[in-house]
Image: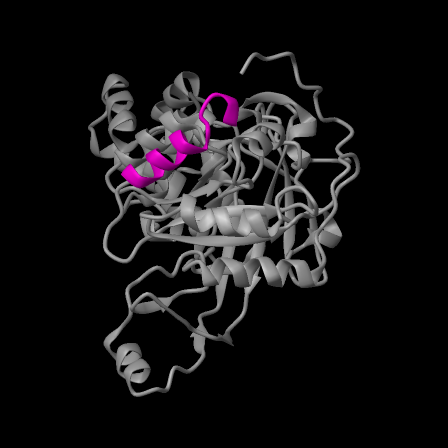
Amino acid sequence: MDLRSLTPAELSERVRAAGEPAYRGEQVFRWLHGRGTGAVVESLDAMSNIPRALGDALAADAPLHPLAVDTVQEAADGTRKLRFRTHDGRAIESVLIPDENRVEPLDFHQGRLARPSDDDDEPETEAERHRRLSGHVPGRLLRDKLTLCVSSQVGCALDCAFCATATLGFSRHLSAGEIVEQVYRATQIAGRRPTNLVFMGMGEPMHNFDGVSRALTLLQHPWGAAFSPRRITVSTVGMVPGIEKLGQLMPAPNLAISLNATTDEVRDRLMPVNRRWPIAVLLDAARRFPLSHGRRVTFEYVLLAGVNDSDDDADRLPRLLRGIPTKVNLIPWNPFAGPAFARPSAERIRTFQERLRQGGLAVYIRTPRGDDIDAACGQLAARGVESLIPAPSVRA
């Protein structure tokens, strides 16, 4: 257990064991996490307000394992891919996605305004309701957002056919400290704190549930970065036990599910996890996921030409999702070398979207961001790091 992964209670316990008063635990936590909005502690020597002997004791018990920034690439659209090197020489990637102020149309759907942004699930305001009822529904000014896509594993064990990370195999889980440090390093690089966090980078978050849930605790703690759970989304390919455990967290973050097919036959081929938790079982878990007022489950649907983009698929999807407060993100496949898939035409994508809307779904097309630097959805593979340690054979 590295020091940055410890909760305040665990730090206080170690501090007391070292013969110091418990309040020293809060001091250490604030150094490690409260400064994460603009500084990253790399050595306990920097903690000037704790005794040197305590720092030595903590370092011996749970040393710091800081990430090293290996590469920062910037795309034409302002997206930045951050490649980090772990203490044991492995490489992981995060992505900073800017979204400047702009006016985006509001879609009225089933008695409320359907929000186009991943995180903006608040119910319709009184002002918006007045404008809608008066027949004037203007565009919505989106605030200057900065979303950080974080990784939870080195590689991935789940072998989805359309995802570049799957080509790496699985090396190991990231610790909670390594997960939250991606946020702090990204803050340094961007010069501002991300407004939204999405666990959609390398790895399957539910496969590393202990590390991810601990990271959520650290990120939400008022002594630290104090992120709202409404600004955090955890995505899964469909590990049902993880969805159930995520729903038990208090408070629970937003849930996103990578669905990508409307039949078990196709999903079995695209996502081997479906053979263990088929679509019906997965959607039952989504129906049971606790949602506070105005929140919805996001379903991600990667569109693959001739595979899952037919009219029949578009007609089946609303029936499958019936009874789940939901929105659907259509993601045109982002190519990488290897798989024999293709992105559907723009016309086919628009037709698919329109049929879903006719079926009563709130649905949005996610424009690829950062695809010129292999930073778009499904493209993260930590390529080009010569010192990357080969993944050992690990049984998932």
Q: Quadrant of residue 281?
A: top left
Residue 226: percent from the left, percent from the top?
A: 32, 49
Q: Nearer the viewer, residue 34 or 148?
A: 148
Decide whether residue 287 is among the magenta residues. Answer: yes
Residue 14: percent from the left, percent from the top?
A: 29, 21
Residue 142, relative to residue 356: is it above or below?
below
Boundaries of the magenta span: 274-288
Q: Main secondary structure of the magenta part?
A: helix
**Which residue sits at x=63%, y=58%?**
349
**Which residue sits at x=52%, y=25%?**
273
Q: Quadrant of residue 304?
A: top right
**Which residue sits at x=43%, y=17%?**
60
> Is residue 171 in view?
yes
Q: Nearer the viewer, residue 213 or 351?
A: 351
Q: Quadrant of the N terminus?
A: top left
Residue 211: percent from the left, percent from the top?
A: 42, 28
